[in-house]
Image: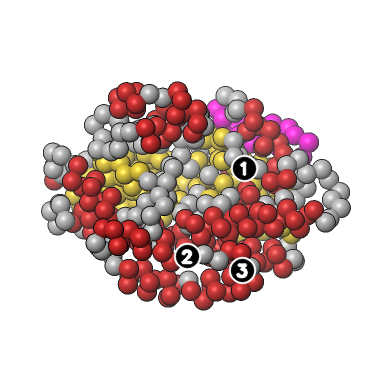
Amino acid sequence: MNKFSEHRTSGVPLKLWDSHQPFEAGAMQQLRNVASLPFVHSHIAGMPDVHWGKGATVGSVIATKRAIVPAAVGVDIGCGMMAVRTSLTAEQLPDSLAAIRAEIERAVPKGFETSRTANHAKGGWAITPNAVARLWYERFEARWRAIVAKHPKVEGKTSDQLGSMGGGNHFIEICLDEESRVWVMLHSGSRGTGNRIGTYFIEAAKEAIAGQRLDFHLADRDLAFLTEGSALFDDYIEAMEFAQDYATANRELMMGRVLEALRKHLPAFKTEKQAINCHHNYATREEHFGERVWVTRKGAVRAGAGELGIIPGSMGTGSFIVEGLGNAESFMSCSHGAGRVMSRGQAKKLISLDQHREAMKGIECRVDEGVLDESPAAYKEIGAVMDAQTDLVAVRHRLRQVVNVKG
């Protein structure tokens, strides 16, 4: 049984997995704005973690015909999750996990650090800069040069950030599942590279439509779009797909660094052959309701039948490994997390350090004012979010974190 509520708009309908609890007014207006675009296909799907974003809500799935909205993809192109289960169990972890957290923090650059600067400061990597350079040149150098040749303003130091974690809601965690097996999970994207690409093409799209006479009202300039057949559209797709591949490789390198850090402190262990590595900010070509369309998932995970995905809660409330049910009405998608209920500014004003410390009891993590905007109270209750999408995914594992590393 489908759990969405349907809302009429001036354009296509909204199908919202809100458990019939209204989303915030600002997010609803953004959903209506996107629904009014004439190239949107069938309907807009709103996941239960919907909240306000730039141009389009975070937590929305938008199918478009022969056009794409760069701001709907966003600036952290390819941002997503990776998880791997190890052969370790909880009994093999030390009583204090502080040394493990410190080792991970040394191993993986975070925030504004890069592989280059952190390497100088910290005396080398478990995965060396040579390995980063080799991956960069094998997978990315020629593609990046082609993008920069056409759009020099996106140029910047790109290989330096491979294998690094962003700030904000990005993280690395050591988790335990329902059978006390140890998992490693992380969240990061295309770093500064994707940011430059996204920012550049969002502005380029605005400039491109500024000279056009549209036969419809564009409700928000951040919904500026690129049309198939134009050189700018083709260039954006090339750059966007580059950033998505970069993000996947970034998570692979991060995971390698974390596993090597763990090997310094834990008994010998193996990892499962199959790791989950999925985007939740991206666009791709898919077929839905009889047409080949561009599907933009802005804060949503593909959940095709049998596909595994990751839905994290907040830094103190655990996460879920899920299997997609292939629900056509959601464009085979599910939520990408819990979704914010407070802006970062609100969270820093309303959540005290004592409240955050209490929420993080039993987890080895940072407890300081720099992470108050990521405290569990700033997010929707993950249990309610999962209850709202039982027609989209089946839970395979419930994870609870025992170590959390933030950027």
Point out the tag, 3 or 1, that comes first from the N-terminus. 1
Badge 1 crowding class, 10 Å Cα cut-off, few under 14, some 14 to 19, many 20 or more, is: some
Magenta region: 4-20
Three-letter code for the amino acid on which mark 2 is drawn: Lys
- Magenta stretch contains residue 125: no
> Is 19 a magenta residue?
yes
- How many residues crowd mark 3 within 10 Å: few (<14), some (14–19), many (20+)? few
Report whether 222 appears left or right of 312: right
3 and 1 marks in contact (CB < 8 Å): no
Q: Is residue 324 left or right of residue 120?
A: right
Quarter of the rendering occupied by the N terminus: top right
Mark 2 crowdedness (10 Å alpha carbons): few <14, some 14-19, many ≥20: few
Which residue is label 1 attached to?
A: 54
The residue that disc 3 covers is 152
The quarter holding residue 173 reads top left
Per the picture, the main secondary structure of the magenta-coloured stretch is: loop
**Residue at the spot 20% in from the left edge and 47% down from the top edge:** 100
Indicate the quadrant where residue 178 lies: top left
Mark 1: which amino acid?
Lys
Q: Earlier in the sequence, mark 2 or mark 3?
A: 3
- Image coordinates of residue 35 in percent, x first then y, are 72, 41
